[in-house]
Amino acid sequence: MVEPLVRRMPDLVTDSMFAEGRAETLRYHEDLYASTPLGAANSWLLEPDQLVLKAIELSRGANPILAFDLGAGVGRHTIPMAQGLAAGSKVIAVDVIPSAIAHLKTNCAAAGVSDMVTPVVGDLEKFTFDTSMVAGLIVGFSAVEHVSSITAMRALLCRCAAATAPGGLVALGIFADRIEELVDGTIRPALVEFDLDSMTVHTVLDEVFPSWIIEYTHTGAEHVPEERDGIPYQLESTLIQFIGRKPR
Ligand SMILES: C[S@@+](CC[C@H](N)C(=O)[O-])C[C@H]1O[C@@H](n2cnc3c(N)ncnc32)[C@H](O)[C@@H]1O
């Protein structure tokens, strides 16, 4: 694992850093979703992540639940959630990019799950849960870290914890320690909304979900080939996976 050469303090992120990281997040995903269909080989859209399949398995019961897919993209996890949860369950799929939600609607229709899914264009930075409902499952895969600061991420996770029903699950995949390695070995900081290191993620998870039952946790290195301005690079990061169950 290559160590980042440049590290910014998480809560010293400036408006321009955030704006630059946010613009890149939007550009990268808009381009990807326009060019790469759900299920495409050699892309992360090929199949759902095992973490989410595990969370669906752990959530499956006789009774319908309300579930959320935060930062849902084009529905890679929304669809298996709708298919795998008990009949009558509902999935609210939230993404900040309108074209992602448009693709998600098309993909849900093709999978025959449109009537179980409520697509929402929204920013997780400000997203609040309807307090009249409690969630049986909240998924955030490569999503909750796309806000303006560690304070904003922690606040979002606190809102997730509060919105979860006793016995319900929160399943998170959070990418940290992101750097970009060019083909000649040059290393540069990743263009993200704010720098996040894995130690901080573990600390925040411990603080926000203190007495929760840990159903699954794993931390490991990830290597994703990407391209910006026609220049290929490898995105190196640490993926922190967490499935917690709220005590009854
Ligand atoms: C790496 S993709 C993951 C998509 C999906 N969770 C999956 O695993 O297939 C991150 C998604 O989060 C969305 N996103 C990023 N920042 C967001 C925000 N602040 N609010 C809502 N969605 C956001 C992006 O538009 C993108 O679709």
Image (cartoon, rainbow, N blue to C red):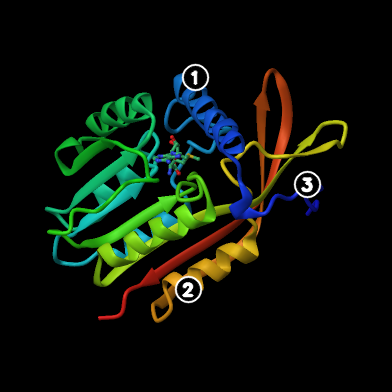
Asked if 24 appears above or below 55 in the picture, the reply is above
Contact, CB < 8 Å: mark 2 with mark 1?
Answer: no
Position of residue 28 measured from the top left corner of the image (x, y, whole percent): 55, 28
Please state which of the two labelled residues, at mark 3 or mark 1, is closer to the viewer.
Answer: 3
Kindly state the secondary structure of the residue where label 3 is placed.
loop
Helix, strand or loop under label 1: helix
Q: Amino acid at mark 1?
A: Ser
Q: Quick check: marks 3 and 1 in contact, CB under 8 Å?
A: no
In the picture of the structure, the residue carrying the numbered disc 2 is: 207
Is disc 3 surrounded by few (<14), some (14 to 19) or many (20+) residues within 10 Å?
few
Q: Quadrant of the N terminus?
A: bottom right
Near-viewer residue (54 or 151): 151
- Labels 3 and 2 touching (C-beta < 8 A): no
Residue 235: x, y in percent?
Answer: 68, 40
Q: Which residue is mark 3?
A: 6
Residues packed near mark 2 inside 10 Å, few (<14), some (14 to 19) or many (20 plus): few
- Determine whether the beta carbon of the residue marked 2 sits less than 8 angstroms from the nearest atom of ligand 1: no
Task: Specify which label sits upstream in the sequence, 2 or 1.
Answer: 1
Say which mark, if any, is on residue 110: none
Q: Is mark 1 within 8 Å of ligand 1?
A: no
Name the residue: 49% across, 44% down.
146
**Residue plotted at (44% across, 33% down):** 39
Between discs 3 and 2, the one toward the N terminus: 3
150 or 68: nearer the viewer: 150
Instruction: Provide residue 102's location: percent of width, then percent of height.
Output: 30, 25
| Residue occupying the point 78% across, 50% down | 4
Q: Which residue is mark 1?
A: 35
